[in-house]
Amino acid sequence: MGRLAAASLAGTAVEFYDFFVYGTAAALVLGPLFFPTFSPLAGTLAAFGTFAVGFLSRPIGSALFGHIGDRYGRRPVMFASLLLTGCATVAVGCVPSYATLGIAAPLLLLVLRFLQGLGLGGEWGGAVLLTAEHAPARRRGLWASFPQVGPAVGFLLANGVMLALSAALTDEQFRAWGWRVPFWAAGLLAAGGLLLRSSLAETPQFTELAAAGEQASAPLAEVAREHWRLVLLTAGALAVGYAVFYAVSTWALSYGTERLGVSRTVMLGCIMAAVAIKGAVTPFMAMLGDRYGRRPLCLTGCAASAVWMFPMVALLHTAQPLLMFLGFLGALLSFITMFAVVAAYLPELYEPRVRCTGAAVGYNLAGVLGGALTPIVATAVSGTGGSGPPWAVAGYLTVVALLSLGCFALLPETLPAAEEVREAAPA
């Protein structure tokens, strides 16, 4: 289990590194470089529009790779998705700016961002099921949480490189070539991830399905026909997690640097510190899910998010590093209370024959609802509040949290897993 967890964590870290480095670049430099004819606000919105394309393609990737995972195994998904995302990310770093290619430059960004999202849409299902289907029932939440640590590691890698380059280079050097370096580094990280995954075994549950010839012939059609309500509820329930995370990691970064005049180094440092703590507490939250159930933690995280959004925006608006960090930390701890357990929760909600497709499609549709729209909506409405805090952003995030809370309330606890835990527990 340790080797499986390490391979899953490494793969998700690399793939989310690829995904996050684009978001950071979109917040800092892509607007002026690829949309120079726009106003600063419109350029940022356009850059976030290319950022959103990656979320729109993630459900397509989850359907495509989910079909492979449910028909041919979880293991092939982990290789193909990582290879696709790594190649697309390296290519982003090679795209000339608008000054060189004209309109073709932002169009190339759109295509490559779409391919990034396609690969990431398949990665989550493969990595999570590799650990969840190997794990003992009473520790399934803990082992399945390691792929959920991967996004924090990927974020820290992406922004650590950006932070180092931002501090070491002049603004002109950073805009000319420095921002491309993290994209080129993705090639080496992807190669390392593929090497680590090369010796992994297929999961026992899929092996049993294949031996009995019980794989779904058309997993997406079966999910749409028999589990559509579950997919919609999980997408709505998880939307708040995406909204909160990308409000902190992408919108707040742009707002702090452009509207509040805080340096890139300070903003990235505050966000990275909060993300590091979030990553460290993920396994602890997952163990609570193994003990008390998945659904109670998800409800708690949603409620905490709804309560914390206005204080977070107020603390951000102070432009004081310690206060901004505390605001981000409260939001991300609310977020991880939910997302630490969903890697076990979602697979337990679906039968094994369509699990790779159903869990991944629901998870990635939530990304469209919460992750794709949040930076765009938040950037648009934050410019309407004058010099005061952007309360409209806090209101938007609170509404998303309440909607997700309602969806979680309609989802069941995964009782079969809970019964297995009780049976396996010592007397």
Image (spheres, rainbow, N blue to C red):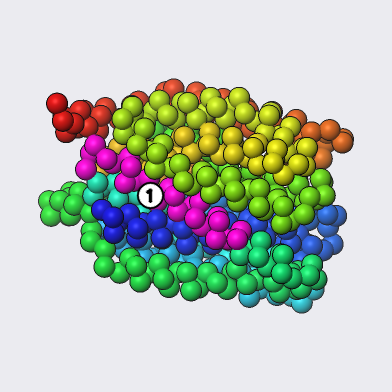
Q: Which percent across, then down, holds residue 254? A: 73, 50
Majority secondary structure of magenta residues: helix
Is residue 383 visible in this depiction of the protein? yes
Q: Is residue 152 magenta?
A: yes
Q: Compared with residue 81, is residue 338 higher up or lower down, i.e. above or below?
A: above
Q: Which percent across, then down, holds residue 155? A: 55, 55
Q: Is residue 153 magenta?
A: yes
Q: Which percent across, then down, holds residue 107? A: 67, 65
Answer with left or right where residue 177 lies relative to residue 291: right
Q: What's the residue type where badge 1 is placed? A: Phe
Between 169 and 132, the one nearer to me in the picture: 169
Residue at point 49%, 52% (across, down): 151
Residue at point 44%, 49% (across, down): 149
The span shown in magenta is 136-160
Image label count? 1
Q: Compared with residue 336, is residue 422 higher up or lower down, i.e. above or below?
A: above
> Of all residues shown, which one is farthest toward the front?
322
Q: Residues within 10 Å of mark 1 (few under 14, many from 20)?
A: many
Q: Compared with residue 343, is residue 168 higher up or lower down, i.e. above or below?
A: below
Answer with left or right where residue 30 lies relative to residue 55: right
Residue at point 25%, 29% (across, down): 418
Query: Tag 1, which secondary structure?
Result: helix
Answer with left or right where residue 5 lies relative to residue 310: left
Residue at point 51%, 57% (across, down): 154
Is residue 347 visible in this depiction of the protein? no
Residue under pointer 1: 146
Between 22 and 138, the one nearer to me in the picture: 138
Quarter of the C terminus within the rendering: top left
